[in-house]
Image (cartoon, rainbow, N blue to C red):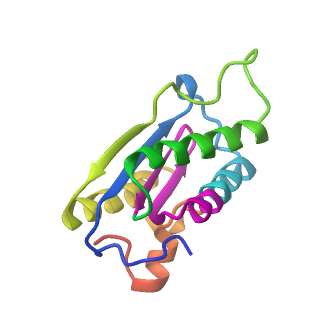
Amino acid sequence: MPNDTEPGEPQVSYFVTVRTFQCRSVFHEEQKAATLVELIETLRRQMGFKKYAYAVLPDHYHVLLGGGPASAAVADAILAINRAMERFIEPEDGGQPLWDDEPEVLVIYTTQSRFEKLNYIHQKPVLCGIVEKPQDYAFSSAAFYFKRYGKTEF
């Protein structure tokens, strides 16, 4: 299950974007994308965050986290996810790093903004031309929302 709370619940949340180094298309391989999804969920549970939405795209990933510890711990969680993924993927391109230097973390204070980011995350595979409908993308939380609520946008 991609989230453990309702996305409309009032609380601070974090919209995170992490890009691969030089925007390399690493996660076009299903096994790598699935492993990243599993790592996000495992570390989310271990660190006590709520996960509202996620999408793993070929050259980056988005995750919308809430609850849990302060924003400093969000950085620790993202660092843990990225390091775990680095252990799974063998270095390419002569030992180039897997990830870009700095993840982008946007603090979200309102329910409306959280829904906007959730919708953006679910629409991103469609905008990238990967699928026609958000719920058809295997490496996103959109299918969960479609199954649970009959829609992917809120």
Where does residue 111 sit, x and y in percent of width and height? 22, 67
Check the picture and name the quadrant holding the C terminus.
bottom left
Numbered circles on residues, count = 0
**Quarter containing the N terminus:** bottom right
Residue 133 in view here? no
| Residue 46 coordinates in the image, percent (x, y) | 62, 62
In the rendered image, the vertical position of residue 4 relative to residue 74, given as above or below? below
In percent of the image, x 47 and y 65: which residue is there?
51
Q: Is residue 57 visible?
A: yes
Quadrant of the rendered image containing residue 118: bottom left
Q: Is residue 40 left or right of residue 116?
A: right
Q: Is residue 57 left or right of residue 152?
A: right
User: Does the magenta-highlighted stretch encompass residue 86?
Assistant: no
Q: Between residues 24 and 46, which one lies in front from this camera angle?
A: 46
In magenta segment, residue 47: yes
The foreground one among 80 and 41 is 80
Q: Which residues are magenta?
A: 41-66
Decide if residue 29 is on the left or right side of residue 137: right
Identified at 55% across, 50% down, the residue is 56
Q: Is residue 61 left or right of residue 123?
A: right
- Write the residue at 38% across / 72% down: 152
Q: Nearer the viewer, residue 136 or 111?
A: 111
Q: Residue 114's x, y, as percent?
A: 28, 62
Q: Position of residue 93 (x, y in %)?
A: 72, 18
Residue at left 65%, top 36%? Answer: 26
